[in-house]
Structure formats: structure tokens, C-alpha cells
Image: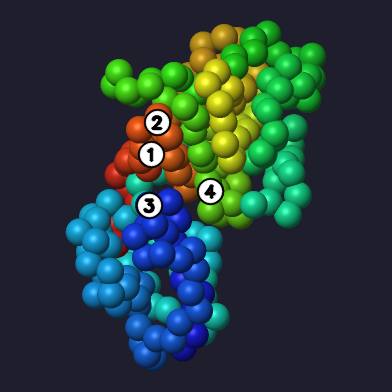
Amino acid sequence: MRARVLFFGMLRDIVGMSREEAEFPEGADLHSVFASYAARFPRLGDLARSIVVARNQEFADPATKLAEGDEVAFLPPVSGGCNTDPLEISEAGNYFALTRHAIDTRTLIARLLSGAEGAVVTFEGTVRNHTKGRPTRCLDYECYESMGLNVMARIGREIAAGYRVERVAMVHRLGRLLIGETSVAVIVTAPHRRAAFEAALEGIDRLKKQVPIWKKERFIDGEVWVEGEWDEHIPSAG
């Protein structure tokens, strides 16, 4: 069987490629696909417990059987190019996007307002100038874009359904960001403030652990992929 295998973030650096078209035996599952690469690149095996697998842009258990033409992605811990920019989903008044341009929260708020809200809560994550005392020059963000946008939209839908809120927007920036720039914005409108605050907090917490986005921090004296963590309910490769 032939499948396309994708690597992101630090995994791309380890294997020296972002994708590969490869042949696998009939009956192969995702675990055996991972094992074949871990045999070629032992560092992958060392990281197995922190790597998750996606099949056709959905998180998948390693025991899932491979099918002809599948797209398999190995994803390092999240630390969270488009054909169009922004890559976006707009539905039921909610808005979700990935962009390489500056995030304008005032425009996003205006997009959400319907007149029914009594509260608007905005969270912006910004690029700080240091990590543990080490001066930061800039950050680079990359994403498994088609999957990332769909996961972000699913989170937003679930939050909109789970709280007494009107509308939800989530936008994440990709590419290189300088100190002080906004990397992510979560905006919630609601009749009352408590629901808006609670929904916005859940939104950013879930986005950072479930959306496949990775961050490389660049310092004056080097660079490093920031190691985050996946949501505990997402199965790992090892």
C-alpha cells in the first residue's frame, strides 16, 4: 500500500524531510508505520510517548489500519503555507482562521457583534522578549494547516454549544512573529460576562493542547522548538 507520510516541527528536523511517499505491507497499522521510521531515525523512538498520529487529518489510535492512499502525519507536542490567507471557516456567526498577517482584534469583534451581547471577552497571546531569562529575538509558528483549522473550528463549536454565549472567534498567526506581536486571539461574545470569561479560558487552553501548531523560539545564540504537551485524551505513537 502507498501512503503519504508527513512530519512537522522538530520531527521534520530529525528525519530531514517534511513528507515522503512510501510503500507499506498489506495489513500495516499506524504503529508499524511509525516503527519503520523509528528504526531509520532512532530519535523518533525516543520521543514516541510524546508524538501523536493523525490519519487523513484526524487524530488516530496507533492500532488503526492503514489504507491505500492514506495521509499519515506524525505530530510532535504542540506549543501552541496557505494557498489563501487567511485560511478560514465562518459558520453560524462564529469565525476560525489561520493567517500570516497581523491579527486585528477590533475587526474580529466587529465581525462577531450582533447586538444581543452584553459582554465581549478578548484573549490575545503575544510574543514576549525572553524565556527563563534568555533573550528572545522572534518566534516561528508552523501548523498542519488543514487539520489545524478543522480542530480549531470543532473546539469553537463545542464551546459555543457548552456555554451561554453568542459567538466565538479563534485566529492563530503563522510564520515569523516579532516581539510584542499577537500570535493568537480568542474572542467570545455573550449576554453576561461570566460565561464569556469561562468560554474564552477554555478556548485558549484547548487550542494550545489540541491544535497541531508548533513554535520555534529564536535567540541571539541559537534556536529551539518549544516542547509543549498534547491533551491527555489524544493517544501517543508509543
**Separation (CA) of disc 4 from disc 2:** 21 Å
Q: Residues within 10 Å of mark 2 (few under 14, many from 20)?
A: some
Q: Nearer the viewer, mark 3 or mark 1?
A: 1
- The quadrant of the image that shows the C terminus is bottom left
Question: Which one is earlier in the sequence, the residue at label 3 or at label 4?
Answer: 3
- For disc 1, the marked residue is 223
Q: Which residue is mark 3?
A: 10
Q: Which of the pair 136/113 is nearer the observer?
A: 136
Q: CA distance from mark 3 to mark 2?
A: 17 Å
Q: Residue furthest bottom?
A: 26
N-term-proximal mark, 3 vs 1: 3
Residue 2 in the image: state x and y as whole percent. Answer: 49, 85
Residues marked 2 and 1 touching at CB (< 8 Å): yes
Q: Earlier in the sequence, mark 4 or mark 2?
A: 4
Q: Nearer the viewer, mark 3 or mark 2?
A: 2
Identify the disc placed on residue 219.
Answer: 2
Q: Residue at x 42, y 35 (%)?
A: 217
Q: Residue at x 49, y 63 (%)?
A: 18
Q: Amino acid at mark 1?
A: Glu
Residue 174 location, quadrant: top right
In the picture, the disc for residue 143 is 4
Local crowd size for mark 3, using a 10 Å CA cut-off: few (<14), some (14–19), many (≥20)? many
- Amino acid type at mark 3: Met
| Disc nearer the start of the sequence (1/4) | 4
* Amino acid carrying mark 4 in the image: Cys
Query: From what the image shows, is residue 39 above or below residue 141?
Result: below
Q: Is residue 48 left or right of residue 157?
A: left
Please tell me whether mark 3 or mark 4 is closer to you in this view: 3
Q: Secondary structure at mark 4?
A: strand
